[in-house]
Image (tube, helix red, strand yellow):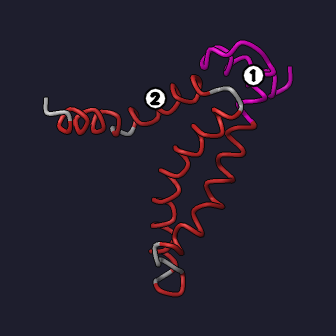
Amino acid sequence: MSKLVKFFKKAKQNWKINSFSQFIIIMIVFAIAGSLSIIISEPLLEFLGLELDNMSAIKYCIIRILIIFPVYQIVLIIIGSIFGQFKFFYEIEKKMLARIGLLKLIKQVSKLTRGQ
């Protein structure tokens, strides 16, 4: 059995996807979102005045990675929606944010802003 077939079977079970075509669409969305996030981060950093000429390479790379993460989250939802997979990627986002503790923080801030 090929590695792709094994990966698909595991993904189908873990992600609760329905078909191989949905799996392919999801993989395409991940690829586009990742690439687009990297492409978008460069001009965003320039807009913020953060250029490699102004700082050390290590500092620039760390800031760029920190910028790419939220950009990726937004782009993933947008591209997923365009491909008709909003529900899937919304659930993926919630899991990802929960794993790093941001989901709890977002809920707390939301409660504070609503006055609860």
Residue visible at 33% across and 38% down? Answer: 101
Q: Is residue 108 found inside the magenta-colored segment of the image?
A: no
Looking at the image, the residue that sits furthest to the front is 114
- Position of residue 91 relative to residue 64, above or below, is above
Q: Main secondary structure of the magenta part?
A: helix
Tell me the CA gap for discs 2 and 1.
19 Å
Kindly identify which numbered label has been placed on residue 95. 2
Residue 109 at x, y = what percent? Answer: 23, 39
**In the image, which disc is placed on residue 22?**
1
Check disc 1: other Cα within 10 Å, few if <14, some if 14-19, many if 20+.
some
Region rendered in magenta? 1-27
Amino acid at circle 2: Lys
Where is residue 80? Give x, y as percent. 64, 34
Percent position of residue 84, x then y: 68, 26
| Quarter the C terminus occupies | top left
Rendered view: 76 above or below 24: below
Q: Earlier in the sequence, mark 2 or mark 1?
A: 1
**In terms of depth relative to the viewer, which is nearer, 60 or 41?**
41
Which numbered disc, 2 or 1, marks the residue closer to the eye? 1
Q: Quadrant of residue 15?
A: top right
